[in-house]
Amino acid sequence: TITNLELLSIKDGVIFDETFATVDGLDMSDIDYGITIYGGEISISNAEIENVRRDAVTVYDGDLILANSTISGIEDGDAIALYTASSTFNMVSIRNVADGSALGMYDSYATVANSLFEGGTGSGIELYSSSLHLATSTVKDFEGAGVSIFTSDFYLSGNTISGNGVGIELYGGNGVITLSDLFDNTEYGLYNGDLGILEAIGNWWGDLTGPYHEVDNPAGLGNAIYGPVDFSGWLLERI
């Protein structure tokens, strides 16, 4: 058990190697790498990690529980990177990510709730052959996509996705997007680059006329949709 740990101006923060640990109260800043986990099970709460030159949190083949924590100021890397890992996030805030993603998932599984992903030159959340359950969270102001999905499973419900280059982009995978607000994304609210129909029923697209779709709803004044999408039953106001 680690409590009230402060690490400032160092290269590597904390490395857990096949460890079972609980961390409550962690302050890291001005570091190259924040937390690296190899196997084991780590529970972290009440952490503040800022000004990281590479990855803030990286998990290889382990389990991570992260709650009531903030990560900000990532220069060149992912705020959180999961490699064949399993994670649960609740009340996590990630801001100001430069070239990497706020959450990068590679052959991994994550459940995320009540969290914020805000601001970056890349994409907010990226999935590669992974599985994500994202609920009651906000993904906003990323120059790339808010959520990028590559051959992955997903369930997105109760989220706000706005102010990104593309709200959600899909290139292979299966899932549902529902009861969410998708609006003010610059190019598309939803881009389906797959051939299968994507289920996106019961969402708010920024206007009561629904999303703009060149074929299925050309009169829609809301965020644009590309590709085969079932966007029926769109909401008439924000959730």
Image: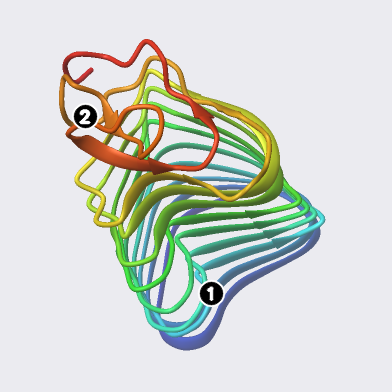
Quarter assignment of residue 118: bottom left
60 on left or right of 192? right
Seen in the picture, residue 58 relative to 198 is either above or below; the reply is below
Tell me the residue that label 1 is attached to.
55
Percent from the top left, x then y, of residue 183? 23, 39
Closer to the camera, 170 or 123? Answer: 170
Badge 2, how many Cα within 10 Å: few under 14, some, many 20+?
A: few
Q: What residue type is labelled 1?
A: Asp
**Which residue sits furthest top?**
233
Percent from the top left, x then y, of residue 21? 68, 49
Q: What element carries label 1?
A: loop
Percent from the top left, x then y, of residue 49? 38, 65
Q: Is mark 2 on a helix, strand or loop?
A: loop
**Point 40% across, 27% down: residue:** 216
Closer to the camera, 93 or 105? Answer: 105
Seen in the picture, residue 80 relative to 55 is either above or below; the reply is above
Closer to the camera, 150 or 131? Answer: 150
118 on left or right of 57? left
28 on left or right of 170? left
Give the CA separation, mark 1 to mark 2.
44 Å
Tell me the residue that label 2 is attached to.
219
Answer yes or no: is residue 104 visible: yes
